[in-house]
Image (spheres, rainbow, N blue to C red):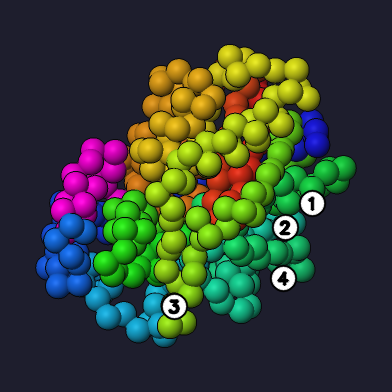
Amino acid sequence: MKNESVSIASLGVATPPYAVKQSEAETFLRNHYSKVLEPKSMSKMVKIFAHPSVLNRYIAVKDLECLVNEDPDSRIARFTEWAVELSSQAINNALVQAGITTGDITGLVVNTCTGYICPGISTYLLEKLGFSNNIRIHDLVGSGCGGSIPNLQICRDIIQGKRDEIVVSVSIEICSATFQMADDLSLIVSNALFADGASAAVLWSRPGVLRLVASASRCDTKYREDIRYIYRNGQLHNQLSLKLSAFASKTVARVVNDLLTPSGLKREDIKHWAFHPGGEKVINAVRDKLGIPEIKLQMTRDILAGYGNMSSPTVLFVLREILSKGVAPGDWCLIVAFGAGLSAHGFLMKAEG
């Protein structure tokens, strides 16, 4: 679906202040969970945490000890507090960049997959930031790491054909609120990758930074059990297949083709690529499947190294990094993210002057 009238005006991000190096995270897990890990699992954990693809992450805790034996009530309270705080920071950042205030906003769409509260996060943001209580608000759940792009799709649809609409798209994940540890490779990998963060984009129907040209989505439900959260004893546990990189890259490639073919574009026409950095193996598989030059993936790898995988906001951290390095008017940009389902989503964008 094409739409040449809606643009991203600005993009803001936020992370918690507590930074964790991989060596610190490994020491924490070793100190508290060595008795639950078999020697083979411990050996794999050491190897995974030593990999240079992730160097630093930001976690919404005072210190890592807070994660030990955190009860469900404390966990959802921490999720709520930090989800609202980080979202607010990202929104304020984006509003300042766009030169507008909360009074200009007519809609707010928030997505998350790492915690559930009712009423949703949007209502807390309405109150905290002083948005009008009659703006249109939506809370989205269940899209996993790919959730920011369906969010943008909905924001675009709200604005389409309505000149005065200005909508804020917020992606917020407190992945540490789903922390679990057991003798399970999915959990070991998750604890080496995931982190916390928020992104906020202001969208409007006037020239901006990036014009939203076309979007595409695919959902391969046969892989549902390979990438998802599952409930055990009433708490979320991340479930990741060791074969994720192979089938995720195929679905991503189909979404890319769905975007480029109708637009008459080729892969070499895309100046800037922003992929969800789901991990080193996934990035490599996407690169090889699409035949993208390694240099085009540098921003994706930089975000993974400096922030880890923050789930849904992460691809917009990559996009923000691309914008910070400079984008020329007329440059084509393509962002793609994938997540639970298995679902993959993409947006074709064009830089504006």
Residue that numbered label 3 is attached to: 232
Residue drawn 41% across the image and 21% down it: 294
The circle drawn on residue 107 is 2
The circle drawn on residue 133 is 4
Measure the alpha-carbon separation of dots 3 and 2.
36 Å
Q: Residues within 10 Å of mark 3 (few under 14, many from 20)?
A: few
Residue drawn 19% across the image and 67% down it: 37
Query: Which residue type does callout 1 highlight?
Result: Ile
Disc 4 or disc 1, which is closer to the eye? 1
Query: Which residue type does callout 3 highlight?
Result: Arg
Measure the alpha-carbon separation of dots 4 and 1.
17 Å
Mark 3 near mark 4, Cβ–Cβ under 8 Å? no
Task: Point out the tag, 3 or 4, that comes first from the N-terminus.
Answer: 4
Task: Point out the tag, 4 or 1, that comes first from the N-terminus.
Answer: 4
Instruction: Indicate the quadrant containing the N terminus: top left, top right, bottom left or bottom right.
Output: top right
Measure the alpha-carbon separation of dots 2 and 4.
10 Å
Residue that numbered label 1 is attached to: 158
x%, y% of residue 137?
A: 71, 64
Whether residue 255 appears in magenta in the rendering, the answer is no
Instruction: Indicate the quadrant containing the C terminus: top left, top right, bottom left or bottom right.
Output: top right
Task: Point out the tag, 2 or 1, that comes first from the N-terminus.
Answer: 2
* Viewer can see residue 48: yes
Query: Which residue type does callout 4 highlight?
Result: Asn
Task: Point out the tag, 3 or 2, that comes first from the N-terminus.
Answer: 2
- What residue span does the magenta drawing correspond to? 42-57
Q: Residues within 10 Å of mark 2 (few under 14, many from 20)?
A: many
Q: Residues within 10 Å of mark 1 (few under 14, many from 20)?
A: some
